[in-house]
Amino acid sequence: MGRVTQARRIETVRIRDGRLFHGRKGDHLAVEEPLDIRLNGQPHSVTMRTPGHDVELIHGLLHSEGRIRTREDIAEARYCDGAVIEDASGHARNTYNVMDFTTRRPQLLPVLPRSSVTTSACGVCGAASIDDVRQQGRYALARDWTITPQAILTAGRAFDAEQTVFRRTGGIHGAALVTPSGEILVQREDVGRHNAVDKVIGWALLQDLLPLSGHLLLVSSRASFEIVQKAYLAGIPLLACVSAASSLAVETAESVGMTLAGFVRGGEDGDGRMNLYTHPERIDLSAAQ
């Protein structure tokens, strides 16, 4: 498997008390490499990602596109043997950057090859409007549970503590599934925020946990339309992000009945804050003064 971080010597520039300082130091970069995705032997897309949990990533991606519904829809997932390069010794090695997925019913899942590269900065979204997202949804979002703000903030602190690659590089995003008690069920990192979400949802799909009606999705980035879409298609009723939410993300969450929280920030002392953009009824505010 490829590296998730890369060591590099860098130049440092700092101004302190009006004086200019210059030096060199070792640093770590988040690795970004292409993953060539093939479906039933045909080109599907190329996405830029951080190597690791590629099977989960592609399962989550194909699910968000509506190509698969359960893990049984995939018959085989394998890295292509021919995707090799010569290393410093002159020996061929697998780059693990080309993966082929075979569906059990290829005739029901037509391949529509893409000519573009999906960058780590943008997600793959087949919906052009909120109405399209609602039509794609298969699960009604649960309204039979609530979570306290304290539980969300506790999960946020645990989430931050487990972002090991982010602490080394500062250039990685994270996503996690959280229970109503604030327990993190699974957490993934990737240079692309949408990839991190796909890895988490792909993991849940492989565990036969969809719909994720009893969980919330916690992301380290802003809430975009694509992330709300991915959460909705997986049946997640609550999305919490550490940064802002876009206008279309708010409109979509409001329309589909999803609770959307932004600027979720917790301190070590247990205090913290968050903004509730839509459907606050899933947040237990009974102790509010």
Image (spheres, rainbow, N blue to C red):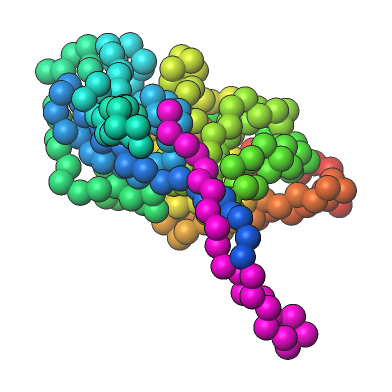
Task: Compare residues 266 and 19 and report the one nearer the observer.
Answer: 19
Task: Compare residues 119 and 64 and report the one nearer the observer.
Answer: 119
x, y percentage for residue 260? Answer: 56, 47
Q: Is residue 245 above or below residue 285?
A: below
x, y percentage for residue 44? Answer: 20, 34
Q: Is residue 223 above or below residue 152?
A: below
The quarter in which the N terminus is drawn is top left
Q: Is residue 178 above or below residue 11?
A: above
Could you tell me which residue is drawn at 86 percent across and 52 percent down? 289
**Residue 14 is a magenta residue:** yes
Task: Compare residues 228 and 55 and report the one nearer the observer.
Answer: 55
- Relative placement, left or right, of 86 versus 150 is left
- Relative placement, left or right, of 193 versus 278 is left
- Relative placement, left or right, of 215 versus 286 is left
x, y percentage for residue 5? Answer: 52, 43
What kind of secondary structure does the magenta stretch mostly adopt?
strand
Could you tell me which residue is drawn at 33 percent across and 50 percent down? 119
Q: Is residue 27 visible?
A: yes
What span is colored magenta in the figure? Answer: 1-23
Could you tell me which residue is drawn at 68 percent across and 43 percent down? 160
x, y percentage for residue 165? Answer: 59, 42
Give the image quarter of residue 50: top left
